[in-house]
Amino acid sequence: MHKRFIVMTGGIILSLTLILTICAPRRNLLQQVQHDGVLRVLTRNSPTTYFNGPHGTRGLEYDLITAFADRIGVKADIRTENNLQDILQQVESGQVQVAAAGLTVTEQRKKRVRFTSPYQYVTQQLVYRTGAVRPHSIRDLLNGNLEVIANSSHVERLKTLKQDVPALKWHENATARSTELLTLVAEQHIDFTVADSNETALHRRYHPELRVAFDISDAQGLAWALRAGKDDSLYRAAQKFFNSLRKSGKLEQMLAQYYGHVRHYNYAGTPTYLRHIKQRMRRYQPLFERAALDNNLDWRLLAAVSYQESNWNPRAVSPTGVRGMMMLTRVTARQLGIKKRTDPAQSIEGGARYIKSLYQRFPEVAEPDRTWMTLAAYNVGFGHVKDARAITAERGGDENKWIDVKESLPLLRKRKWYKKTRYGYARGHEPVRYVEHIRSYYDILRWRTERSVPPIRNKLAFSSPAL
């Protein structure tokens, strides 16, 4: 009797367990992701999306997706895939939950996946090389070699244009990235390509011979792609995330972080800079490398600062009396023990030590903001940067974020603000431009050196800045 009771009781418990399991509400996609603790994401390896820089993993899409993962309380498992067809297919099949890959929202793609609202707008641009005859219309492409990324929004647009110009032809490259096609145009291997305006802006700094002939599309949105279906829980969470970023101004700040310094870059000066890299830098590179090694810097950052200061001219002199490769003042040189400011080796070593000393005065600031504030202080003085940080905090910004501080620096020209500071008036717009120029010089120099045989490796500059 006792055993029979136990068996009956066990059967009842098992039945109740099954009933509760069956009746328990199924988790939606967002809840399942949160239960698993992992968000599966696919992106592309590109300067506009996701890349490994001196600071580690960086990129606009990387910053966005990690912020979203933090918002919903999970970790992001990010993988890269450059084939656009494979990216969309993996979203459709549910192999990944989000594609954060700089995808253009098109009508054809909307039939396959569900897009969030755009976080950025770009235009498709027809790119050619200076020296060639500039095309003014699609018909001007008929006698040239046009190559684009396979399965891209560029192909979709060209198919539409082909309806009006039936003779239009192009080659679809299934393996190259947009930056590689732009390089092929610059090196005269192909005549034309199509690239999004954000990619063109970044890449023209490396290849000043590239030119934009005309836009072949209106502004188009870039957005995340998620699987289409009845379960829109993760999609709604992503929409809420982007709405919050827009409302707070954070999205605009993130875009400015990656593109702000590019907007003000003087492309006309790039040929001169590249010529100086070939003609002047080779002579001074060992000095930059040695000083950088001694001070735990990235020699390319040190060289970029020197170019902004003197165009690598050891005899450079300003109207205010600063001179040499690193344009040291007489007082700073004396403090650093530099006896001859026009001696390249002494100037570069002194500049490196001065940068390091300024960097050590921002221990509470994380990278890459710490490097940008250090460079601003090299230009305008540590005290004025300190004042700008105080103004930033007063205005409700983050005094540890360069994107906020650079908005406050120009206020040092206005009496309303500088009268409340310790160090007073300063031409605060100058260090902002100064940092932006150095970021581009550094970016170009890093790109040039990484494409060639690597030079002597030294320790990374402050973990080295990533652009």
Image (tube, helix red, strand yellow):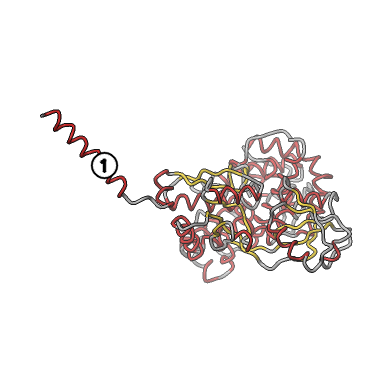
The answer to which of 304 and 145 lies nearer the viewer is 145
Q: Quadrant of the N terminus?
A: top left
Q: Residue at x 33, y 51 (%)?
A: 25
Nearest the eye: 19 or 213:
19
Residue 369 lies left or right of residue 32; in this view the side is right
Q: Is residue 208 visible?
A: yes
**Percent from the top left, x then y, of residue 189?**
85, 49
Which of the 4 image quarters holds residue 9?
top left
Q: Residue at x 77, y 67 (%)?
A: 163
Q: In the rendered view, does 27 fall on the left or right side of 398? A: left
Query: From the viewer's perspective, is 242 left or right of 434?
Result: left
Return the x and y of residue 315 as percentages of the image width and height.
Answer: 79, 49
Pick the front one: 203 or 99: 99
In the displayed structure, 160 sits above or below 91; it is below
Mark 1, residue position:
17
Say which amino acid is labelled 1.
Thr
Where does residue 180 sit, x and y in percent of width and height? 75, 48
Mark 1 crowd level (few <14, some 14–19, many ≥20, 10 Å Cα): few
Residue at x 11%, y 29% (from the top left corner): 2
Up/down of 455 relative to 31, above or below? above
Question: Which residue appears farthest toward the left when viewing the image?
Answer: 1
Q: Position of residue 465 (x, y in %)?
A: 62, 46
Q: Is residue 326 visible?
A: no
Label 1 secondary element:
helix
